[in-house]
Every structure is written in structure tokens, then in C-alpha cells.
Amino acid sequence: MKDDKYTAEKFKPEFEPEELRAAKMAPLVMLPFSDEAHTAVDALLDQTVSFQREQGRRKRGLKAGVALSLKATIAALIGDLLEATLNTESNGYCWRLGDRTKFKVTLATSRHYETLKKEWPLMGLMDVVDGFRGSDDWDGEIYHPNTPNKRWATRLRATSVLLSKLEDFGISPATLSLHFRTEQKKSQPISLRATKARDQTKTKNIQYAKTPLTDALESDVREINEFLSEWEYSFGAPPVLYRLFNNGDTEDYQWDMGGRFYGSDSTYINWKSENRKGIQIGGEATAEIDIKACQLTMLHGLFGVDYDVGVDLYEIDGFDRDEVKRTVHIIVGNGRVSGRRNPVQIKLLEQYPFLNDLEARGLNSLRLQAMDSNIMNQTLLTLKRQHNIPALPIHDCLIVRARDIGTAEEVFSEVFDEHIGVKPTLETELQ
């Protein structure tokens, strides 16, 4: 029976405004990776076309080219919906602008996306909250769905029906990387964000101007991603990494804040350490190489203060190591020593008096991240170019095959010394 209204309006889901705010963009750049994923996408394609026929909105089958582009749109959307399910703050919601020009950098087409946005809620596969206006602080009348001023993009979420159908093929949010991968040609190798105010939880992305420096940054990340794509991983599809820089709206920005490597929400970088234990590269066991007390080690080098390699700088007699580490991170995060003193801070300043000079040198956590991310970038490229060794970054740590530990430690240490002026203390643990 044909629906009287070609709309999902009467199927609007219940939600909390904070969930919609916490949603992340659906980039629509995922491809099916496994046989199960291809089969699932084909099944959803057939189901969608059959539903359109039942509702009288399609009389004939799809031409080959149209079927391929619709399949690509379905696959990209499924990938993003699965990844959004991992975002507990948004309760599974993601968002997507309907602007046709924005689809040029996706694997989807605007026309097919709009079709799925209309059909899938009617099929019970997806919750949709159409573009709407909401106040910034979500006080008072927070949701205004019928106003022409749509400041907030449409929100999307997989329903339990869709998740159950995917489970039938062995696909779940937790196994996303085993079944879908990001198309590298559509990925953005570097990302720039605005300065975050104290009361903000996230900041906006900034469109940066293309310069020789940004070209070089992009080229390095693409080279790393292309090399990583040549290897097999126990967690599924090869990771597609990008570097995230911060405070891009400051005057005369020099790309010297942030810059660490990240991936999608489902990427190994976001896993808890215990969940990374079984990672294999090329079917081989791996090890994680960590720089011990990285921030304090960097500050020793930057201030020209010697230290004994092998000594844990966070170990101070009479004080809990975790509390010492936490206090250092607070001081470095603020870029200065606070006026409020406590026993840990007093002892730290006695042992490391250069902490008093952070503000004068313009040093803070984001500037140190820019340095350690440049170290990581050069380390990854050196391991690739000179040794054909794949390495997975986790901020200031490396995951390499167990057979490559010696070479990786040597390269990591030499690059760190080249940038900072001291050798780091490395701690290696077999996964």
C-alpha cells in the first residue's frame, strides 16, 4: 500500500538535545572490505528497491550504473552509522549536511543519500532528525523543527532493526574495521581546529589555506597511509590516519600546536590499552614502544638540562607516581605554574625548576604535542623509507612487529634526540 506522505516526519525518534550536539559528521567515505560486508550491502540494496516498488515509487529495476552508485551510498552510510553507534555521548547519532556540493568529497551521491534519508526511516532502518534550529545552550525552547532557519544539520542514527540485520552477517559496531575501510583518496590527511574555550567540549574545524607547508604535511600523511595500506592487520582494514592541529585561528598560525595522528572513532588509536594487546601486523605478533615520561623528557631537552637515560622522571621518593604525572600534565597543560601550591607541586618545582619558565618560553601541552607529532611523523617515514618497517602510531607510542623492535627503538630514539636534544627512555612491551 502506497504511503500518503513521502516523509519520515511521523516517525521522529525521541532524543535528548545533548545527544544531537554530541553527534559527529558522517563523512560518507567508507567502502565494504569483507565478503560479509558486500553481501550485507547487496541485501540492503535489494530490500530498499523492493520497498520502493511496494510503495509505488519505483516501477522498474535499476540500471547497472545507478545500482553501483546506490550501493556505494548504502555502504558509506552503513559504515558511518556503525561508527556513530560507538559514540555513546550522542547515543549513536551522526550528522550530515544535505548540500549537494559537499558530496563531491564522498563516495555517496546527494540524490541517493536523500532517497535513503526518506526511505530507511519508513523501513525502520534509520532514525532521522531533520535539519533544525536549536539554542546554543539548549535552554528553554531548544528544538524548533518547523522554522526555516536550520542552524543544525540533519541527525541520523541506525535503529535496532538495522543493527540486527547487520548482525545476521556478523557485522557489528565492534567489528566495523573488519568489514569496512575508508577510501584513502577521499580522506583528509590534516585537519585544523579553532581554539577551544574553557567551557567548550569541542571546537569547529577551520578551512585552511593551501601553502607549501600544508602540501608537505599532507604529502607525508598520504605516504604513510599508502604504505600502511600494503599490510594486513588483525583488526581488519588498514587504518587511514590524519594529523589534527589545534588553535588554527590564532594570529600568524605556524602549525605548531597539536598535530598528533588520529583515525576514525573505531581506529585502534582510540582503543583501551588492553584491547590493543592482540594486534598483529602481517600475521606477526607486535610490541608497543612507549616514551617514558615524555613531556618531562622533552622539557629537559628544550631547557638544556641533562638527565640519566633510563630513570623514570615521574618517580619521586615519597610521592605517588600517578599523582606526580597528573600534576605535571596540569602544569604543562596550562603552560604555567598555578599560584596554588600543594606538596606534589612544591616538590616538582624543587626537582624541575624549569617548570616555572614554561610561560616565558611559550611552552604548553599543544606545543609539545606539535613536537612529539613531528618526531612521530619522521620516525614513521624513516622506518618506511629506509627499513620497509610498518609502524602504527599512538600519540607518543609506536606499535611494530616484534621482529622490528631493535630497529624501531633505534630510529625512534635518534629522531627524538635530533628534535629535542636528549635521548628518551623507551619502554617496550610485547603485545
Image (tube, rainbow, N blue to C red):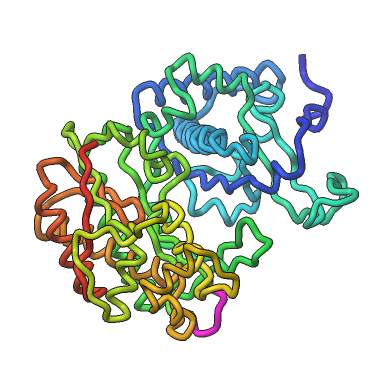
Residue at position x 19%, y 59% in the image: 310
Q: Quadrant of the C terminus?
A: top left
Q: Quadrant of the N terminus?
A: top right
Residue at position x 49%, y 18% in the image: 167
| Frontmost residue, 253 versus 303 | 303
Residue stretch rendered in magenta on the structure:
248-252
196 vs 322: above or below:
below
Q: Position of residue 119 (x, y in %)?
A: 67, 28
| Frontmost residue, 161 versus 16 | 16
- Is residue 188 at all visible to an observer of this figure? yes
Left or right side of 367 for 55: right
The quadrant in which residue 8 appears is: top right
Q: Position of residue 39 (x, y in %)?
A: 41, 20
In the picture as drawn, the residue positioned furthest to the front comes out as: 318
- Is residue 115 at all visible to an observer of this figure? no
Q: Position of residue 92 (x, y in %)?
A: 61, 35
Assign the magenta stretch its main secondary structure: loop
The quadrant in which residue 279 appears is: top left
Residue at position x 22%, y 42% in the image: 429
